[in-house]
Amino acid sequence: MKPQELRASAALAAVFSVRLLGLFMIYPVFAAYAGTLAGANPYLIGEALGIYGLTQGLLQIPFGLLSDRIGRKVMIVFGLALFGLGSAVAAISTTIGGVIIGRALQGGGAVGSVILALVADLTGEDNRTAAMAMVGVTIGASFLVALLAGPVVASFIGVAGIFWLMVALGLVGIAITQFVVPNPPRIRVHRDAEAVPALLGAVLRNRELLRLDLGIFALHAMLTASFLVVPDLLRSTVGVAVHDQWLLYLPVLLISIAAMVPAIIVAEKYRRMKGVFVSAVLGLLASQIMLFFSLTLSSSVAAIFYREIVLRPAAVAEVFA
């Protein structure tokens, strides 16, 4: 990859990450916070957590198409400004309705498709896959860091403070876009990186893609639903305070990464993509069944893990400090 391509890819990956960092950071702590807002009930709490995904999904293609006409960087800055506005609305809201509006505005800053199109504009075809991989790695790293940092940050500045932090991260993203990301020599249409209106009908009729879309939808729905119940479950059944729950998330994420890397290698090297994919789906199904039928056992295991692996070493360290 040429130096200018590396710089452009890294800068755009950073823009992607600062936005996602704030969005993901709210997940582990949102349910408990939202329960204190006026008018909150389980349905509205779930709507507040997930509505950003709806507006983001609806606006990805329009943002991409508009960027073809008025410029990539213009749309990225506009999207990040909308994200920051939504974050501020959520931060000052004392009702669940206000937070829902703020979260919808956050998702309205749907710059993902535009960033990928700009990556394609600024890289050659030979290096585009590596550039897209850099963005993908950044997304995964943002999720990992945010999931662990969210409870800790919330213990210092509160959940409203995290929303204000999102405003700051949005401003950082705008600064990177304006002053670090180079201007593309020209805007081009990339079939592999953005929406092509002529192909939308064919995509919507493709059954294989529709099945994959449904699977991704289900996966994200399960992820969001889990963060609506798991933090409170850990607090009520295991006694783990919200700001300490990262101590349980960390080993789970590390084990997941350790299992994921060999699976990717097998899928890519031995052309077993579908087999690995189906195995992952079956593993996910098995885990949900185990949680449903063995909630007491799962809670007991988590409690033992928390006591023996987290609290006991901490107590020993305190003695020798």
Image: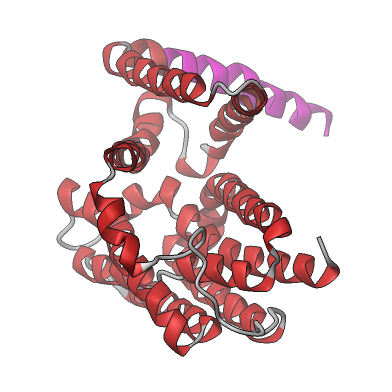
Q: Name which residue lies at 69% across and 67% down.
A: 123
Viewer-nearest residue: 83 or 119:
119
Is residue 308 one of those drawn in magenta?
yes
Task: Tell me, yes or no, if residue 269 can be seen here.
Answer: yes
Q: How is the image coloured?
A: secondary structure
Magenta-drawn stretch contains 310:
yes
Instruction: Determine which quarter of the picture holds residue 62.
Output: bottom left
- Give the answer, above or below, for where 149 lies relative to 78: above
Q: Residue at x 67, y 85 (%)?
A: 185
Residue 36 visible in this rendered orientation of the protein: no
Q: Position of residue 242 (x, y in %)?
A: 46, 42
x then y, percent, for residue 95 = 22, 67
Q: Main secondary structure of the magenta part?
A: helix
Give the percent coordinates (x, y) of residue 56: 34, 64
Q: Quadrant of the N terminus?
A: bottom right
Residues drawn in magenta: 300-321
Report whether 260 appears left or right of 54: right
Say which residue appears at 62% left-offset and 67% top-offset. Answer: 119
Residue in the foreground of this view, choosing between 286 and 5: 5
